[in-house]
Amino acid sequence: MIGSSPECPACGNDSHLTTPESAKKVYDTRSWGGDTGMMKVSSADRVCAWCRSVRISGEWVRMQTVSSRARELEQSSSSKSKSDFVDSLTAGSRDV
């Protein structure tokens, strides 16, 4: 269990939560800019690689807007639309 919940509060995903160290090894976290590009993955204590949200000092924030991340995922998919990904990226229990 990660913190008080085993899933990301932004997207509800439980299979892409990881530590910042693991995220850096598996994903190209340097490309995670967006609206909050000044935040660093390394300063987080938890990372959701699916929606690119991070938990810093107990607070979850998105490192990339939902629209931008959905567009990025749509471009790498052959069968899902941007709106499919928006639904997936916002399926969590909180508005992050």
Image: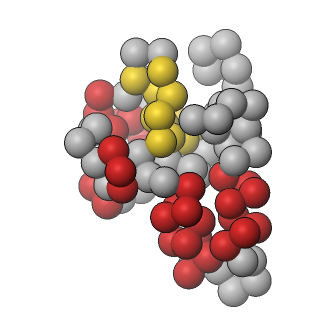
Looking at the rendered image, the quarter that the C terminus falls into is: top right
**Which of 36 and 74 lies nearest the eye of the viewer?**
36
Against 29, residue 59 (above or below) is above
Against 8, residue 71 (above or below) is below
Q: How is the image coloured?
A: secondary structure
Q: Is residue 34 left or right of residue 90?
A: left
Q: Is residue 36 left or right of residue 62?
A: left
Residue most extreme to the bottom: 78
Against 21, residue 78 (above or below) is below
Please identify the quarter of the rendering in which residue 83 is found: bottom right
Q: Residue at the spot x=76%, y=45% of the render?
A: 91
Q: Residue at the spot x=55%, y=62% of the render?
A: 67
Q: Residue at the spot x=69%, y=64% of the render?
A: 85
Percent across and percent down for residue 45 are: 42, 24
The answer to whether residue 90 is visible is yes
Percent across and percent down for residue 48 are: 54, 41
Against 93, residue 70 (above or below) is below
Q: Is residue 5 left or right of residue 33?
A: right
Percent across and percent down for residue 66 are: 56, 55
The answer to whether residue 26 is visible is no
**Which of 59 and 3 lies nearest the eye of the viewer?**
59
Please identify the quarter of the rendering in which residue 7 is found: top right
Q: Is residue 80 left or right of residue 29?
A: right
**Which of 14 and 72 lies nearest the eye of the viewer?**
72
Percent across and percent down for residue 10 are: 64, 38
Q: Residue at the spot x=33%, y=44% of the render?
A: 36
Looking at the rendered image, the quarter that the N terminus falls into is: top right
Please identify the quarter of the rendering in which residue 33 is found: bottom left
